[in-house]
Structure formats: C-alpha cells, structure tokens
Image (spheres, rainbow, N blue to C red):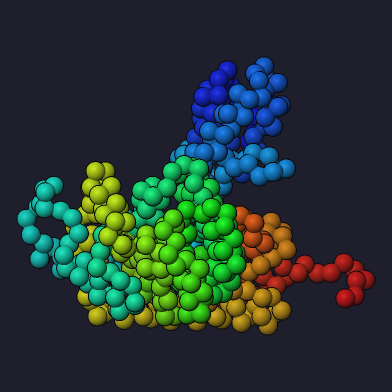
Amino acid sequence: MAAHYQIEGSTSAAISASVERGIRDGGFAPGDPLPAVRALATELALSPATVARAYQELRQRGLVVTAGRHGTRVRPRPPVASRRAGLLPPPLPGARNLSAGQPDPRLLPPLGPRLAALAAEIGPPTGYAANAVVPDLADAARERLSADGVPAAEITVTGGALDGIERLLAAHLRPGDAVAVEDPGWANLLDLVAALGLRAIGVPVDDEGLTAPGVRAALAAGARALIVTSRAQNPTGAAVSADRADALRALLAGRSDLLLIEDDHAAELARVPLHPLAGATPAWAFVRSVSKPYGPDLRLAVLAGDEATVARVAGRARVGAGWVSTVLQRLVLALWRDPATAGLVDRAGASYERRRNGLVDALAAHGVAAHGRTGINVWVPVPDETVVVTALRDAGWSVAPGVINRIAAAPGVRITVSPLDEADLAPLAAAVARAVRPSAPFGFTA
Ligand SMILES: Cc1ncc(COP(=O)(O)O)c(C=O)c1O
C-alpha cells in the first residue's frame, strides 16, 4: 500500500521512475493515493515544482490521475504491467462473477471446424510482400457495412476495435488534445485515452446514446475527436436511435476540425438497427469488431472511413506491426460465410436480450430502475457503489463498480448477463434491490 512504499529520487525523472517501479512491483495498487506534492517535496528535501513535474509526467502517461480535492491517485488500470496482478485475491469461493464484461463462452462459435476447413484450403506460406487486407474479406465487410448504411469504399483491418481506435487517435491527435467520450463509458477506452496523454471530456449518455447538449458542450470545450458507441454501449447498453443520429449529424455537419469515431462492437449481436453517423464530418472512421459475436481471441476489426483517415491507419500499421495475419482474416471470413455460425450468433443475440430484459424487468418489479437496451450488460444506478458491490459480494454475486467507467457521471454498478441463467434473474434482482436499498433504520417510516 502507499503508506509502505517509499518514493525516492532527487529529480523529477527519478521520482516518476520510482512511482512507476512502485506500480510494477505492487507497492502502489490501482487507486492508491500518492503523497501530496508539498509533503513529498518536504520529505525528499526538493522544491514542490520538481515533484509537481514528476506527477505531471505520470499524469500525461496515464499512470496517475489528479482529481481536485481527492489528490493524485494511481489510475484503476495504469498502462504498466504489474507483478501484483497475479497476486490479486481470487473471487470469493462460490461467488458468481458478473463483473467481467465478457461474451458468454457457451454462445461463441467453436473455431475448430472452421480452422480444420481452413487448413485444407490455405495456400503455401506467404512472406512479407503479399500481405495486406484479404480482398475477399474486404468485399464481404463492404457488403455488410453498406447494408447497414455505412459508406465502405475505403476499408482496412485492425487488431480489434481498441487497436483501431488507438491508431486513429495517434494519427490525428497530439498529447494534450481533448477527446469527447461517453460518460459513463468503456473503461478500457478511458485508460487508452489517458495512456496516450489525451484529455477525456465526458459526454452524458442516455438510452439513445450521447446527448446532443453534451456533444455541443464537448465541441465548445475544444474536443478534437468524438468517440461514439453505436450499439451495446458499455456500460449502459444504449444504442444510437434514428432521432439521436439525426440530431448528432446536424451538430457535427461540416466540422472539419473533428475526428468522428464510431465503435460498433456488438455488430451482429445488437438486435437493434444501426443508425450510423459515418460521413457527418470530413474525417471519420467506423470500426466494427468481431470480438462480441465471434470471440475476443480473434483480435480483428474492420475499419471504414474517409480516404485520408483509412490511409493514415493502414499506412501507420504498415510501418509498425505490418498487417493483421491473413490466417485470422481468412478465419473470420469463413465464420461470416458459415450459415451455422450465423444461426448461433442470432441465437446468442436473442439469449442476451432475454437475460437483459428479464433482469431489467425483475429489478423494476422491486422498484429498481436499470438500463440495458442492447448488448451483454445491465447498468444499475446506485447511491453508493462500494456499499452495493460489498453487499452483493456477501450475497454471492460479484459485480463491477462503475467508478472505472465514470468521469462525472452518477454512480452505478455494471452487471454482465453472460454467466446468468434465466433461473438466476429473480434471486439476483432481489439481492440487488436489498443492496441498493438496505433496510431502513428501525422505526423509520417513509
Ligand atoms: C465499447 C466496446 N468497444 C469495443 C469492445 C471490443 O473491443 P476489441 O475489438 O478491441 O476486442 C468492447 C469490449 O468490451 C467494448 O465494450
């Protein structure tokens, strides 16, 4: 813990290296406070400006966050691998883990048969020169995206949605630039934005997506990029509606100073129509991952956009990682073409929908409002995350505190429905209701 970790150094670089070492070695856990600037300066007999510079450097690299009177703390998931990760206490024996945000492994297509078929048709090993986007995959992606109203003349492939978003942000923005993100939003994205040294501006979300006044305010505050989750927003399950898409398109029209990024990670699982914003701004990208319907281990997303934006992403990849393995590209193509897989993905979407709606309805019967229009999560606004997470853990359910998803949004907990069976919904809803509203004090009447 922080109290036991001694930060050392006589220069700002040495102090920030010492803090980083502390994070790696487990001396600092995620969320731990760092000493106040003045206190550490006194302890190390240095000027406060030297310590402040060290903290600023750590902040720009996304290792720590400074939040007003709460001081400076280690970020929930700093971009430094920690040896401590392996030492984290295991979940309580018997507790059901609903905190992971993972698709249901029972509903992911088995890869074995498709890999076996691929083995028969794949040609001789290829070298560096021949590799890029597999033309048949590009054609199939174009067809799928165009059918959903996304202009897909220009297309490339990335190692998942977040890899695509990282390449887009790195190609268009500079450290210190502001990025408008959903609040509450996807924790990994908030971590990435911090790790790139960018500033996140939180935009409120309702069930129809980013609110128009929130986007207007973010634009006025100087946002250089806007990231929109089309469907299955994480953590609220929001999906951009037709009306909201119209309103946002009108707001964004002609903004040549803004990069618009859409993340359609739920893709074939979403079960609500896509209302894309693609093309509303001159610089735009639409990223569709295969992780949720077909499996996160495929590490693949297709990225469409305007010609200059796609060229930046593809060109930057070429001078770095190179390309996404054509073996994976062919595997995804085989999954897309397989009617049995399409049937499974359809059943998976229906199953998530039943479990999500079942949980939201069961919670409503207890007077607890919750959100979950699409996707694999249900978001429950709560008065105090720690109280609710602890009470639910004691009742045998592990849920995710919303603190890792939030900038200024109100507290909540995220419940992933993937591990749930329908018989779990009533007891879980009852446990959530008890945790959200612990019994009133004796003698209290409302
Ligand atoms: C909002 C959002 N986008 C994208 C993804 C998937 O990203 P990737 O394609 O990098 O696996 C997730 C996974 O949880 C997500 O919640």
Q: Is any part of residue 319 visible from this angle?
A: yes
Residue 224 image position (x, y, % from top left): 47, 53
- Observer-nearest residue: 232 or 182? 182
- Observer-nearest residue: 445 or 289? 289
Residue at the location (7% across, 59% down)? 123
Give residue 405's quadrant in the image.
Answer: bottom right
Residue at the location (50% across, 43% down)? 176
Q: Is residue 223 left or right of residue 443?
A: left
In the depicted structure, whether residue 438 falls above or below residue 162: below
- Observer-nearest residue: 101 or 403? 403
Dividing the image into 4 quarters, which one contains the C terminus? bottom right
Residue at the location (72% across, 68% down)? 436
Instruction: Count every numbered label the image shows and give the total.
Output: 0
Q: Is any part of residue 86 visible from this angle?
A: no
Residue lying at the far right in this picture: please name it: 443
Residue at the location (34% across, 77% down)? 148
Residue 251 image position (x, y, % from top left): 50, 68
Residue 406 image position (x, y, % from top left): 60, 57
Dividing the image into 4 quarters, which one contains the N terminus? top right
- Observer-nearest residue: 195 or 438? 195
In the depicted structure, whether residue 227 falls above or below residue 174: below
Q: Is residue 110 left or right of residue 250?
A: left
Q: Is residue 284 left or right of residue 29?
A: left
Give residue 143's quadrant in the image.
Answer: bottom left
Residue 236 image position (x, y, % from top left): 56, 68
